[in-house]
Image (cartoon, rainbow, N blue to C red):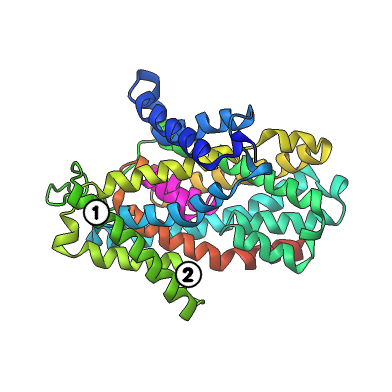
Amino acid sequence: MSFSENPLYVLGVLCLMVVLSIYAAKTTIGKKLGAALLVILFTALIANIGVIPSASDSIPLYDAIFTYVAPISIFYLLLGVNLRSIRTAGAPMIVLFLIGSLATTLGFLISWVIVSPQDILGDDGRVLAGMLTGTYTGGSVNFNAVALEYDFQEKGILYAGTIAVDNVVTTLWIIITLAIPTMLRRFWIDKKIGVPKRSNESGNGASMSLQSLSWLLFLGIGAFVITEWFTQLFPAIPSIITLSTIGILLAQSRFVSRLQGAHALGLYLVFLFLAVIGAYCELSSVVALKEIGITLLLFASLGVLIHGILVIVLGGLVYRDWEMIAIVSQANIGGGTTAIALAETFDRKELIVPAIMVGTLGNALGTYLGFLVVYLL
């Protein structure tokens, strides 16, 4: 194992990227971008120049962050949840997510006509279109469900190339959705749905004491262990639903709600997760595929772009809450965890649980829409 793959070294670099992003976000330019976007950009840069491993030579540390850190970060953020605001924001989020799922399907059907990936990929293009529709509705589970049905995973280089393109497009879309509210407000003033009144009762945003840190670490790890045990007993129930439910129930306890620093700890872990997302944005893997890679990138990018345009237009006509629309679009394209990162960045804590809800809904819909696209093409 080379030094650049040493997990402590890589973790140290990821932590440094978070530190730099937080400080950079306080500058004049950085305030417009935000720490979440900056940590993705900084890590993508150093991963592409070889300072830390990227997607093609992924290390176990990255998998650990996806498997453990990301869900536990959601748990901590849920400890300050406001149930009344969820009731207000939940229905609009679901409606917008269904619009987004339809927009993804239409986006790839239109992109198929414009880019004509079948000219380069042949019959594999149909399967690939279904895989991308699935993953940009629900996630990697749907991506692989379509791939397995057609033995696409056996096409080693093409399968790996599609994953590389997916990583690049997902990262780019996170950057775009972070900027959507600011850009659109210049032309079309929006309204925020379900924004609760601020309260100082909870200790989740306060400085953290040793006692609070001890309790938070215990609760986070304990909740994750219970979730894994429960998932083994009831595998049909998504683990994120179980973990979220535990977090919401604990949040209603006066003792837990007064623990200091849960929000800061959860947000820091989200930034670590986003740093790995940045590391997975590997442009060299796309370039290495030459004509196939460029075709895949154009096809996926155009499909997602059309999704974005449709969601903005239709969502603007229905609700016109640009932050909510950006979060829902990110739930489609990047999944529930990146959608939650956007909710935190926009300081829309009332949208965290609805983001988890629509992320799970995407897992349920994605495979069906993926197979529908394969059938239609």
Front residue of 231/9: it is 9
Image quarter where the C terminus lies is bottom right
**Helix, strand or loop at mark 2:** loop
- Give the farthest residue toward the top: 28
Q: Which residue is mark 1?
A: 214
Front residue of 145/235: it is 235
Separation of residues labelled 1 and 2 (CA atoms)? 28 Å
Tell me the amino acid under the disc marked 1. Ser
Q: Residues within 10 Å of mark 2 (few under 14, many from 20)?
A: some
For residue 309, above or below residue 72: above
Tell me, yes or no, if residue 147 can be seen here: yes
Within the image, what quadrant is residue 187 found in? Answer: top left
Residue 244 appears at what percent x and percent y? 36, 64
Tell me, yes or no, if residue 320 can be seen here: no
Residue 188 appears at what percent x and percent y? 40, 35
Query: Who's the residue at 52% across and 37% down the image?
Result: 10
Front residue of 336/156: it is 156
The region drawn magenta spans 323-343
Q: How many marks?
A: 2
Q: Please give the label number shown on residue 238.
A: 2
Residue 260 appears at what percent x and percent y? 19, 48
Q: Is residue 138 left or right of residue 36?
A: right
Q: Is residue 42 magenta?
A: no
For residue 16, above or below residue 345: above
